[in-house]
Image (cartoon, rainbow, N blue to C red):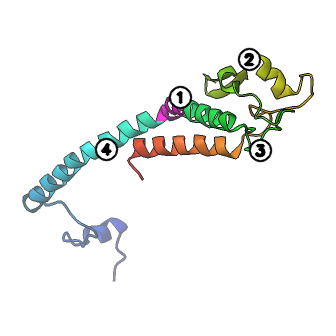
Amino acid sequence: MEAQSRAETLDRTPSNRLTFGPILNTRRDTKRIATAAEVLASGDKEIDEMISSLRELSKFVTGSAGRARRAVDADSRRKISRGQDPNGKPWQPTKAGERPLKNAGAALSVKLVGKRIVWTLKGIEARHHLGAVKGKVKRQIIPIEDIPSSVAKAITQTYNSEFARITGSK
């Protein structure tokens, strides 16, 4: 038997080889291709909505900050009207036994500076807040160190509802 060259061996490969996976047959698959294009086209609306939602989500923090500020302001004024510090602890009554700082709400200002919420006090209420008054009684009106749980809850609820509105989730 003669030795065959590699080229001669390759020439003997049958022309009807088996293939793995689908092969495109334009006659048979024209309808399937059209159907796939229709499915992709119908998904365009959903993709456009997702892109729009993501664009709106990029403005999420700055857009929601105003609502969060209003929620924090309402919480702070509610505590002041009850005669409580930011953590809900009642203020020490006056020497006459009355509720102190009845007009503290008018001295309070809650503003948005960039992405931060800033509390400010003016007038005698600011001095009472620091305890820099005649009786040296400190009646805290605005948070000093830690964010009170009620303020954190108000901010969280605001951002959660805004996130749900943007994403369409519950």
What's drawn in magenta, residue-wise? 58-67
- For residue 28, which quarter of the picture? bottom left
Q: CA distance from mark 3 to mark 4?
A: 51 Å
Q: Indicate the quadrant where residue 119 lies.
A: top right
Q: Are marks 3 and 4 in contact (CB under 8 Å)?
A: no
- Is 110 situated above or below 76? above
Instruction: Report, in whole angstroms, how far the alpha carbon at label 3 lies from the one at label 2.
Output: 22 Å
Looking at the image, is mark 3 or mark 4 earlier in the sequence? 4
Which residue, given by chain and number where applicable, does mark 3 sit on? 89
User: Measured from the top left, where is residue 16 in percent x and y?
Assistant: 19, 71
Query: Magenta includes 64?
Result: yes
Residue 21, horizontal then vertical, whole percent: 27, 68
C-alpha distance separating marks 1 and 4? 29 Å
- The residue pinned by badge 1 equals 66
Q: Amino acid at mark 2?
A: Lys
Please name whichever residue, 127 or 111, is drawn nearer the observer in this view of the structure: 127
The residue under label 4 is 47
Are the two marked residues, 2 and 4, in contact with CB atoms closer than 8 angstroms?
A: no
Judged left or right of residue 148, residue 49 is: left
The residues bearing labels 2 and 1 have C-alpha atoms spaced at a distance of: 22 Å
| Secondary-structure class at tag 4 | helix
Q: Nearer the viewer, mark 1 or mark 3?
A: 3
Q: Amino acid at mark 3?
A: Lys
User: Which is nearer the N-term, disc 2 or disc 4?
Assistant: 4
Q: CA distance from mark 1 to mark 3?
A: 27 Å
Depth check, mark 2 against mark 4: the one in front is 2
Circle nearer the N terminus (1, 3) = 1
Residue 80: within the magenta? no
Looking at the image, is mark 1 or mark 4 nearer the viewer? 1
